[in-house]
Image (cartoon, rainbow, N blue to C red):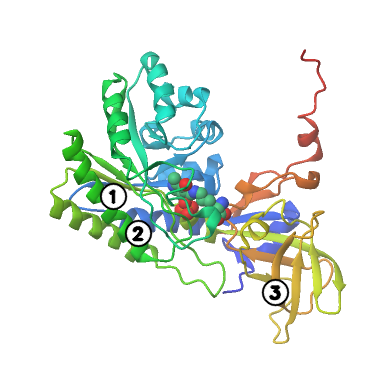
């Protein structure tokens, strides 16, 4: 991995002088580059294509504004993410609302101008929707989430398309799906458009995506006959892998997008499908490599077998190592890149033995006050951050062309206190 001590043309030290640590710094040019790589390579002459940014990876108005400007749509999974998009120029028709347990209130938000498409996860959700769609002023598109039962060889917690997963309806459940489609067709303000599937995250295998396309295309063919309808849209979800450490070699975005489109074009021709649009939803593939978290080193500790360095954040700002055993690369950017390196365990400051950010980091002799940059933290870092131990969420900065902007200020003790009211309710 390359040691970066500048982001967006500015030295990390200068940014940190303004914001303090820990801080998430996004290279805005990398965000834009990734968005464009997806957008420019995911095109077809046979059908329309759409790239949605999966905002669960990192949701804030500024990144949604960028996605809208670059012609991407948006994948949201909660009223909160939908609300966040509401304050941006993101076109409603480009917003897709996912989730296995959307509340009535969230569905109402979507129907009343929040989202152009709702991805229905189960039949009970459709019953709820059928009940409330009568009052809607606009028509909302509907995709049904299908669980194709494809194993994408990813971490158990982020594999989502196994047959016993909580998401979607099994591809084998044709009768149930036909009933749902018929029910959608009877709703005046809902319009059935097609299917959605998502087979996992951080997927390195081209074959997994191709298998997904083959399974879904064949399924579309069958369901067109079985239900006597034309299916216009297939949404393949996200899952594009990124490079966290030198061990990772993800397929470059361009060739992978082209493989996906070609595989789909082939199936559309072979089976004579009526597909009008193919959609993907990358989150990590857009946000991860653009983000770096910078910490200050505090105390150190030596045991018989390990040497720890403690940083001023940890599992509260990045739960991924503790939750998934995720690995990251880091550099001490306060010291020149010396040849002699010590092996350190990078531990956070939370009250939890599992609060280890990096189990083995090779760094020059590291001292109190040094800045430690942990790379590729832009996806599922800030968005999964918590206030564990009442640590405030870090500041977020976007940097580009020698300019840095504070996008989210650091959460303060007062912000946390503002939630405490002690008011009698019964
Ligand atoms: N679409 C759907 C329906 C999804 O469930 C997901 C991710 C995405 C798109 C975006 O996937 P991506 O392109 O980012 O892989 N917290 C975990 C990842 C959970 C992913 C959940 N769904 C992590 O930190 O690795």
Q: Give the crowd class for mark 2: few <14, some 14-19, many >=20 residues within 10 Å.
A: many
The CA distance from mark 3 to mark 2 is 33 Å
Q: Specify whether residue 379 is in view.
A: no
Q: Is residue 327 left or right of residue 217?
A: right
Q: Provide the residue designation for mark 1.
A: 216
Q: Which element type, helix, strand or loop, lies under badge 2?
A: helix
Q: Where is residue 151 drawn, in percent x and y?
A: 42, 59
Q: Earlier in the sequence, mark 2 or mark 1?
A: 2
Q: Nearer the viewer, residue 100 or 188?
A: 100
What residue occupies the far bottom of the structure in this picture?
A: 339
Please, is residue 147 above or below residue 144 in the view? below
Give the number of the mark in front: 3 or 2. 2
Q: Choose top left, top right, bottom left or bottom right for residue 315.
A: bottom right
Residue at 73% from the left image edge and 52% from the top image edge: 19
Q: Nearer the viewer, residue 154 or 43?
A: 154
The C terminus appears in which quarter of the rendering? top right
Residue at 66% from the left image edge and 59% from the top image edge: 293
Residue at 51% from the left image edge and 67% from the top image edge: 243
Q: Give the crowd class for mark 1: few <14, some 14-19, many >=20 residues within 10 Å.
A: many
Q: Which element type, helix, strand or loop, lies under badge 3?
A: strand
Q: Provide the residue designation for mark 2.
A: 209
Q: Provide the residue designation for mark 3.
A: 360
The N terminus appears in which quarter of the rendering? bottom right
Q: Choose top left, top right, bottom left or bottom right for residue 38.
A: bottom left
* Residue 144 numbered tag: none
Q: Is residue 335 left or right of residue 148?
A: right
Q: Nearer the viewer, residue 40 or 78?
A: 78
Q: Where is residue 183 drawn, in percent x and y?
A: 30, 24
Task: Confirm or reject: label 3 Cβ below 8 Å from ligand 1.
Answer: no
């Amino acid at each position: 991995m390359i040691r970066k001590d500048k982001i967006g043309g500015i030295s990390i030290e200068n940014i940190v002088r303004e914001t303090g640590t820990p801080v998430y710094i996004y290279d805005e040019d990398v965000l834009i580059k990734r968005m464009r790589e997806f957008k420019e390579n995911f095109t077809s002459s046979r059908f329309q294509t759409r790239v949605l940014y999966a905002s669960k990876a990192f949701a804030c108005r500024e990144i949604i504004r960028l996605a809208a400007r670059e012609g991407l749509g948006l994948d949201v999974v909660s009223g909160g993410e939908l609300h966040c998009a509401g304050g941006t120029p993101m076109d409603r028709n480009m917003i897709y609302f996912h989730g296995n347990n959307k509340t009535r209130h969230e569905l109402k938000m979507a129907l009343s101008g929040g989202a152009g498409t709702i991805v229905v996860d189960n039949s009970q959700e459709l019953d709820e929707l059928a009940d409330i769609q009568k009052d809607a002023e606009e028509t909302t598109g509907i995709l049904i989430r299908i669980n194709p039962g494809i194993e994408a060889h990813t971490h158990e917690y982020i594999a989502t398309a196994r047959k016993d997963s909580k998401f979607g309806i099994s591809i084998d459940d044709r009768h149930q799906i036909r009933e749902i489609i018929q029910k959608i067709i009877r709703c005046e303000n809902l319009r059935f458009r097609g299917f959605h599937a998502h087979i996992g995250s951080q997927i390195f295998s081209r074959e997994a995506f191709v298998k997904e396309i083959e399974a879904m295309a064949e399924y579309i063919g069958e369901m067109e006959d079985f239900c006597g309808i034309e299916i216009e849209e297939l949404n393949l979800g996200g899952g594009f892998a990124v490079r966290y450490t030198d061990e990772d070699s993800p397929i470059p975005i361009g060739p992978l997008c082209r493989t996906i489109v070609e595989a789909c074009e082939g199936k559309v021709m072979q089976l004579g499908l009526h597909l009008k649009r193919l959609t993907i939803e990358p989150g990590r593939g857009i946000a991860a490599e653009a983000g770096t978290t910078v910490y200050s080193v505090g105390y150190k500790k030596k045991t018989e077998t390990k040497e720890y360095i403690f940083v001023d954040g940890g599992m509260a700002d990045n739960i991924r190592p503790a939750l998934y055993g995720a690995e990251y690369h880091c550099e001490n950017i306060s010291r020149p890149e010396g040849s002699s390196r010590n092996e350190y365990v990078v531990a956070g400051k939370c009250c939890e033995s599992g609060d280890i950010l990096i189990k083995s980091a090779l760094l020059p002799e590291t001292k109190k006050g040094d800045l430690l940059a942990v790379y590729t933290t832009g996806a599922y870092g800030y968005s999964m951050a918590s206030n564990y131990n009442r640590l405030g969420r870090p500041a977020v900065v976007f940097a580009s062309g020698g300019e840095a902007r504070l996008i989210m200020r650091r959460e303060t003790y007062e912000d946390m206190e503002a939630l405490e009211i002690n008011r009698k309710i019964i």
